[in-house]
């Protein structure tokens, strides 16, 4: 039995997965290196992402109700399990800092221009630590409240922009090289779908341990539908100009103008990002403090909330010298950097468990 005693339903987990996957992707365009074909790259990337999810679900079902850190211990032994766990948690820690960096760059660039980055970052950290310290159930309930509003605002902006769509912006189709297209598709699989690997830490809390695949499947498909509409909206309204903007979704919604009355609704994009980004960061923070406490045998994980949150915040301010470096890392480095953690560790763990026929009957590992 792990440190997390709370339980969440399949519906709560699915909504949390959707919120997590939308997170920062509501601002960016997954597969954006494909340009006007990013919507096609996103669909191909979803297929790869579902393969990732199949690995995660299979591993979770093989060790029902078993905390991930205990799974590592069973498969790799005491020392090896701790090493693998620390590498995995290090990735989630870095990913959490990247989410905070995105917060900083977005609000500093477009909204709170004169506000120090540290103020933005540690404001988010303070709120997220408070939520994460209250456990997974509270984080899941937050997603139940915030996700419907985010989806409503998204659909509203999409409908208001339909009149500004230009079909010629989608032509020619697949004019880019095959190499560039498939790299874009892989990028979309890694960001955001592969990041759902973090839910391996939450799946043991599922009230029905036989439903992780259903939750991951629905979460990925629904979030893909939202991101697909986002890609179509951005391309339909901006065309090739979307390639010059750091935040094409924000720029696209700035085009909304209904009778010179309903304008400047791009703030809804900022609100959605704030809500979904908060949930993504909070879950990553929760996963890191829970996993770290289990690795070092602590009796309580909540005491790690503020120290880990502050360290994440500090790292977020040091990640990149500027927004250009951030995007260069996202487009060129992250699709390769994330693979060992998103695919390598879960797949290798599953294969070794199958070879060693773990867990053995009677619960002995």
Image (cartoon, rainbow, N blue to C red):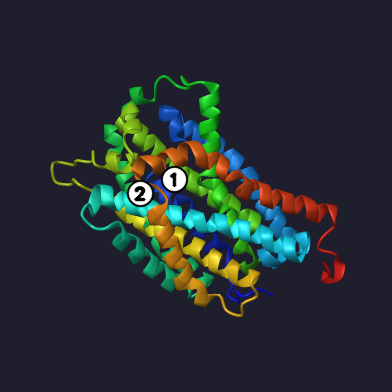
Please state which of residues 220 and 359 is positioned toward the viewer in this rendering: 359
Give neighbour class at mark 2: few <14, some 14-19, many 20+ (Cα, 10 Å). Answer: some
Q: Quadrant of the N terminus?
A: bottom right
Query: Is residue 7 shown above or below 86?
Result: below
Residue at 71% across, 53% down: 58
Pick whichever, 48 or 123, lies toward us: 123
Residue 130 position (above or below residue 176): below
Q: Is residue 245 visible?
A: yes
Q: Which residue does the numbered mark 2 point to in the structure image?
A: 154
Q: Secondary structure at mark 1?
A: helix
Q: Is residue 288 left or right of residue 30?
A: right
Quarter-wise, where is residue 172 in the image? top left
Q: Secondary structure at mark 2?
A: helix
Q: Is residue 55 visible?
A: no
Image quarter for residue 316? bottom left
Residue 221, given in percent of the width and then of the height, sits at 54, 46
Residue at x-position 47% and y-position 57%: 96
- Give the residue displayed 58% in from the left and 63% down from the top: 10
Is 207 drawn above or below residue 196 in the view shown? below
Mark 1 and mark 2 in contact (Cβ < 8 Å)? yes
Q: Position of residue 204 (x, y in %)?
A: 65, 66
Cα distance in 3D space between marks 2 and 1: 8 Å
Q: Residue furthest bottom?
A: 299
According to the picture, the residue beneath numbered tag 1 turns out to be: 226
Q: Residue 151, position in %: x, y?
A: 39, 53
Number of numbered tags placed on the structure image:
2
Lower position in the chain sequence, tag 2 or tag 1: 2
Quick one: which residue is furthest to the left in this view?
Answer: 260
Q: Position of residue 211 (x, y in %)?
A: 65, 59
Q: Quadrant of the C terminus?
A: bottom right
Q: Which label was assigned to residue 315?
A: none
């Amino acid at each position: 039995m792990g440190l997390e005693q709370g339980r969440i339903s399949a519906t709560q987990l699915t909504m949390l997965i959707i919120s997590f996957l939308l997170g920062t992707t509501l601002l960016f365009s997954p597969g954006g290196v494909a340009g006007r074909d990013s919507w096609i790259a996103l669909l191909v990337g979803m297929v790869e992402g579902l393969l990732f999810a199949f690995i995660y679900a299979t591993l979770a079902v093989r060790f029902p109700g078993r905390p991930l850190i205990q799974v590592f211990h069973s498969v790799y032994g005491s020392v090896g399990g701790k090493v693998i766990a620390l590498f995995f948690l290090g990735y989630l820690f870095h990913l959490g800092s990247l989410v905070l960096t995105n917060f900083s760059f977005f609000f500093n660039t477009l909204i709170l221009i004169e506000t120090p980055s540290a103020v933005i970052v540690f404001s988010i950290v303070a709120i997220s630590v408070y939520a994460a310290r209250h456990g997974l159930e509270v984080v899941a309930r937050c997603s139940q409240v915030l996700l419907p509003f985010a989806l409503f605002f998204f659909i509203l902006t999409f409908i208001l922009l339909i009149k500004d769509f230009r079909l010629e912006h989608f032509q020619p189709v697949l004019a880019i090289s095959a190499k560039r297209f498939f790299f874009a598709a892989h990028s979309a699989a890694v960001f955001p779908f592969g990041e759902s690997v973090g839910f391996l830490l939450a799946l043991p809390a599922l009230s029905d341990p036989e439903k992780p695949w259903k939750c991951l499947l629905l979460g990925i498909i629904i979030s893909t539908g939202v991101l697909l509409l986002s890609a179509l909206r951005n391309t339909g309204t901006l065309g090739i100009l979307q390639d010059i903007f750091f935040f094409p979704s924000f720029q696209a919604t700035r085009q909304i103008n209904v009778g010179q009355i309903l304008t400047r609704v791009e703030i809804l994009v900022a609100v959605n990002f704030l809500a979904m980004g908060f949930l993504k960061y909070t879950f990553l923070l929760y996963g890191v403090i829970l996993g770290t406490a289990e690795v070092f045998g602590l009796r309580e994980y909540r005491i790690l909330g503020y120290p880990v949150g502050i360290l994440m915040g500090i790292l977020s301010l040091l990640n990149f010298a500027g927004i250009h470096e951030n995007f260069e890392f996202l487009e060129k480095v992250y699709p390769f950097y994330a693979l060992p953690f998103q695919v390598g560790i879960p797949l290798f763990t599953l294969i070794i468990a199958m070879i060693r026929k773990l867990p053995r009957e009677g619960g002995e590992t």
